[in-house]
Image (cartoon, rainbow, N blue to C red):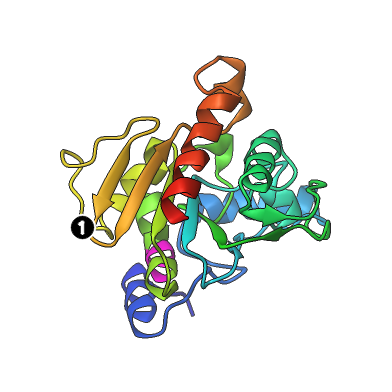
Amino acid sequence: MTTSRSEVARSSRQAPTLVPDRDCPLCPRLVAFREANRAREPSWHNAPVPPFGDIKARLLIVGLAPGMQGANRTGRPFTGDYAGDLLYATLLEYGFAKGTYQARPDDGMKLVDCRIANAVHCVPPQNKPLPVEINTCRPFLVANLETMPNLRAIVALGRIAHDTVLKPLSLKASQAPFGHGAVHQAGRFKLYDSYHCSRYNTNTGVLTTDMFRSVFAKIRADLD
């Protein structure tokens, strides 16, 4: 039996589901890509990637989607690719993680008062989810937002993540335009914007390490 998008939305309201089923059928293009990846790399995760971190955390980081060589391979958000190298080094520096990041899910690193989720849970072709796929997966992100009792700060890594969280925060784009380093108030929450920590953005100078660190320095000061 297949599951309709409206059924997923209803189920997330009734009993929050924080991650799609391993064989989630809702996005045909992503299903086909997943099946091809499973055939090519059977030892990889190749499934929706669950959030990482404590549901009681005050900070939620929202990324775009799993990277092919990163979370799609390892099964943990931002683990195994360059974006994770920069993200986890920054989280360790500002006390949002402890241990040692070794780019694998069994490295023993723990998040501290922090949780990481993605706007889209499955890896998309060319790392570019379609608008319909973003909308289809949003109920799972909403469920995470609604299930975090102590949530105070949300970091959107990139414009798509930013746009994805506006609706559940009851913010209009005109009220909260995306901009690196911008902070938007949404009731008891603050939404912090950052350019995505991808290798492309850092290689082209769109995002520097200091620019990225400044976002988390601000969050650390606000939460403390």
Query: In the image, residue 15 lies at what x, y percent?
Result: 41, 84
Categorize mark 1 by other alpha carbons within 10 Å: few (<14), some (14-19), many (20+). Answer: few
Q: Is residue 172 left or right of residue 112?
A: left
Q: Amino acid at mark 1?
A: Ser
Q: Which residue position is annotated with label 1?
A: 170
**In this view of the protein, which residue sits in the foreground, 93 or 45?**
93
**In this view of the protein, which residue sits in the foreground, 173 or 92?**
92
**In this view of the protein, which residue sits in the foreground, 12 or 191?**
191
Dividing the picture into quarters, in which one does residue 45 lie? bottom right
Q: Is residue 210 left or right of residue 133?
A: right
Residue at image position (56%, 63%) is 113
The magenta stretch is 139-143
Query: In the image, residue 142 lies at what x, y percent?
Result: 37, 65
Say above or below: 133 vs 69: below
The stretch drawn in magenta includes residue 58 = no
Q: Main secondary structure of the magenta part?
A: helix
